[in-house]
Amino acid sequence: MEPALAKAAAAGVLRHEQADVLSGWIDALVAAGLVRVSADQYRTLGLTTAGREVMHGRAEPSQLAAPSRTPRASWRGPHGMARWRGSGGDW
């Protein structure tokens, strides 16, 4: 985690959530254009310019929808990357 993010008030607030819930939040943040996923082999997450504005309180996350609490298909699952690659998807 970037040092500036580690010091943020929001750091660690989801640490008690299950993996499927975290996955849902990541998917929602990516869909809202607030977080990007790198294209390298390690698939790291990073804030977009819009995400940085929200983190600093200068903007509201207008397109962010809270994920459902039920497990669902995700690109992080055992077959997710194959589904994503087959769909012609792009980050």
Image: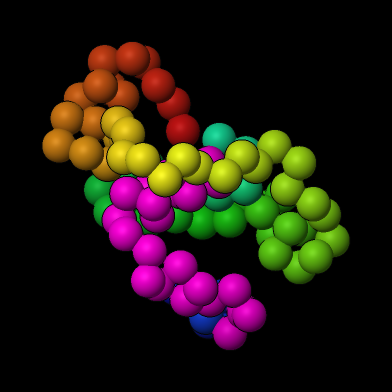
> With 49 as the anchor, is 65 left or right in this view?
left
Quadrant of the rendering where the N terminus is positioned: bottom left
Residue furthest to the right in view is 58
Q: Is residue 65 magenta?
A: no
Q: Nearer the viewer, residue 69 or 85?
A: 69
> With 62 as the anchor, is 39 left or right in this view?
left
* Above or below: residue 74 compared with residue 52: above
Q: Quadrant of residue 71?
A: top left
Q: Is residue 14 magenta?
A: yes
Q: Nearer the viewer, residue 42 or 33?
A: 33
Q: Position of residue 52 (x, y in %)?
A: 69, 60
Q: Position of residue 25 (x, y in %)?
A: 48, 49
- The residue depicted at 47 percent of the width and 76 percent of the height is 12
**Residue 38 in view in this figure:** no
- The residue depicted at 32 percent of the width and 34 percent of the height is 72
* Above or below: residue 73 compared with residue 66: above
> With 61 as the anchor, is 91 left or right in this view?
left
Residue furthest to the bottom in view is 7
Residue furthest to the left in view is 78
Q: Position of residue 74 (x, y in %)?
A: 32, 35
Q: Position of residue 50 (x, y in %)?
A: 72, 49
Q: Quadrant of residue 19?
A: bottom left
Highlighted range, magenta: 7-30
> With 30 as the anchor, is 58 left or right in this view?
right
**Residue 19 in view in this figure:** yes
- The residue depicted at 31 percent of the width and 24 percent of the height is 84
Q: Nearer the viewer, residue 39 or 71?
A: 71
